[in-house]
Amino acid sequence: MEKIIDRQTLLLRLSGELDMNTSEQLRQIIDSDIERRGIRTVILNFANVQFIDSSGLGMILGRYKKLMSLGGKLKITNVPPHIYKIMELSGLPKIIRFYPDEISAREDGRKGNAQ
């Protein structure tokens, strides 16, 4: 996993599996940065994720709810087709914004902040 923080945005480039063994650690990383660094936008890049299970989906949904309660956003990018199918079955694309790449996700946030 690669972690990049830019102002109030946390970008995580995930890899491997997002399952019962890894979801709790990822939840702790995200929650810690939300609380300690004032993160309000989390971008999860799934380009190198091979597998996700229900605990991974639950972790994503929990972070979405936490950020929404703080006026923040969760964005998901670069989702491989086999992972997207699982997310689609769970209903995530109906509530969370998906982007084709990191640039699109970042630019969407900048447009919303333009004055």
Image: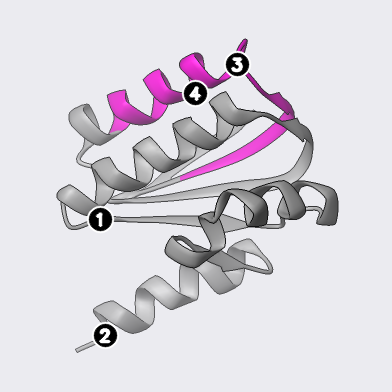
Q: Residue 38 in magenta? A: no
Residues at marks 1 and 4, CA–CA distance in whole angstroms: 18 Å
Q: Name the spot of residue 97 as percent of width and height, x first.
A: 49, 66
Task: Tell me the residue at 48%/33% (across/down).
Answer: 58
Residues at marks 1 and 2, CA–CA distance in whole angstroms: 16 Å
Numbered mark located on residue 26 in the image:
4
Residues at marks 2 and 3, CA–CA distance in whole angstroms: 36 Å
Which amino acid, mark 1? Gly
3 and 4 marks in contact (CB < 8 Å): yes
Front in this rendered view, residue 25 or 52: 52
Q: Earlier in the sequence, mark 1 or mark 2?
A: 1
Front in this rendered view, residue 76 or 95: 95
Q: Earlier in the sequence, mark 4 or mark 2?
A: 4
Residue that carries the numbered disc 1 in the rendered image: 72
Residue that carries the numbered disc 3 in the rendered image: 22
Residue 90 vertical position relative to residue 109 in the rendered view, above or below: above
Task: Tell me the residue at 60%/62% (across/down).
Answer: 102
Which quadrant, please, contains the N terminus?
top right
1 and 4 marks in contact (CB < 8 Å): no
Q: Does residue 39 appear anywhere in the picture? A: no
Q: Name the spot of residue 68 as percent of width and height, x first.
A: 24, 53
Task: Identify the secondary structure beneath mark 3.
Answer: loop
